């Protein structure tokens, strides 16, 4: 078990998803509309065109990431697609100090580890209407055939985990598509008792 964020009474809302389901857009929408804030992932991945440091993620070099980790500044470190990911205690605590609810995006097989860090977390799983739907989204994004194949293998892994052991760790499950987006956002906000921004 890692170190918990300092003195946190917070009940973060953890959102898990298969790749390309649209979870980041949903989380950003909730943060804009309610007293909640997306906990940025700290990562060594290369920024995509249009991404901004400390807006989309906190981008670090491999050496910077390793130093932060060795100093105990990170929790829930993992790897995906050749990059390192984690969360920073300081960014989590800053959200809590502002009386906002942390919104945390988690790869579902990591949910047990996260709940070990913060057992008060509330949990949401966003699932696609079908695997074909996700594959079409990835292709439409212009991703290469190799990347689509790799991501779809991860999607299959994640859905298998959720449909087996993982379901017990999620209190709420929603099917997310552009057509269900608004209703899903409102349902999550209501269930989690988010306060609207003034």
Image (cartoon, helix red, strand yellow):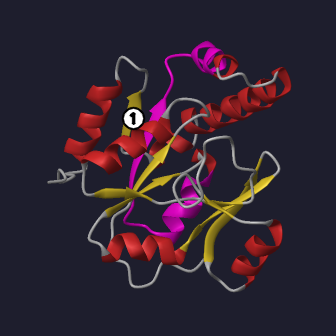
Task: Verify whether residue 136 appears in magenta.
Answer: yes
Q: Which residues are magenta?
A: 110-137
Q: Residue at x 45, y 84 (%)?
A: 6
Can residue 61 be seen in the rendering of this structure? yes
The image shows a total of numbered marks equal to: 1
Which residue is at the front of the view, 28 or 194? Answer: 28
Q: Residue furthest left?
A: 198
Report the quarter where the C terminus lies: bottom left
- Relative to 48, residue 62 above or below: below
Can residue 1 be seen in the rendering of this structure? no
- The answer to which image quadrant residue 81 occupies is top right
Which residue is at the front of the view, 157 or 63? Answer: 63
- Secondary structure of the residue carrying tag 1 is strand
Q: Which residue is mark 1?
A: 173
Q: Position of residue 26 (x, y in %)?
A: 41, 38
Q: Position of residue 41 (x, y in %)?
A: 58, 59
Q: Residue at x 52, y 70 (%)?
A: 117
- Relative to 178, residue 118 above or below: below
Q: Residues within 10 Å of mark 1 (few under 14, many from 20)?
A: some
Task: Verify whether residue 163 appears in magenta.
Answer: no
- Relative to 187, residue 193 above or below: below
Q: Residue at x 51, y 55 (%)?
A: 55
- The answer to which image quadrant residue 61 occupies is bottom right
Q: Position of residue 67 (x, y in %)?
A: 76, 80
Q: Residue at x 53, y 29 (%)?
A: 21
Which residue is at the front of the view, 136 or 10? Answer: 136
Report the quarter where the N terminus lies: bottom right
- Residue 187 is left or right of residue 41, and the answer is left
- Residue 129 is left or right of residue 100, and the answer is right
- Relative to 161, residue 197 above or below: below
Q: Position of residue 155 (x, y in %)?
A: 67, 31
């Amino acid at each position: 078990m890692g170190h918990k964020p300092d003195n946190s009474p917070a009940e973060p809302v953890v959102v898990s998803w298969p790749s390309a389901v649209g979870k980041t857009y949903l989380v950003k929408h909730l943060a804009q509309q309610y007293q909640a804030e997306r906990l940025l992932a700290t990562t060594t991945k290369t920024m995509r065109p249009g991404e901004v440091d400390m807006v989309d993620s906190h981008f670090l070099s491999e050496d910077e990431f390793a130093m932060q980790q060795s100093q105990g500044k990170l929790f829930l470190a993992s790897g995906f697609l050749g990059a390192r990911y984690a969360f920073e205690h300081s960014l989590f605590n800053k959200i809590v100090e502002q009386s906002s609810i942390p919104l945390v995006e988690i790869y579902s097989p990591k949910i047990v580890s996260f709940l070990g860090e913060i057992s008060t977390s509330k949990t949401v799983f966003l699932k696609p209407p079908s695997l074909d739907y996700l594959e079409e989204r990835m292709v439409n994004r212009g991703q290469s055939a190799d990347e689509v194949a790799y991501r779809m293998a991860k999607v299959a892994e994640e859905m298998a985990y959720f449909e087996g052991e993982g379901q017990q760790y999620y209190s709420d499950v929603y099917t997310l598509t552009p057509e269900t987006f608004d209703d899903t956002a409102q349902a999550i906000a209501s269930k989690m008792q988010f306060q609207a921004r003034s």
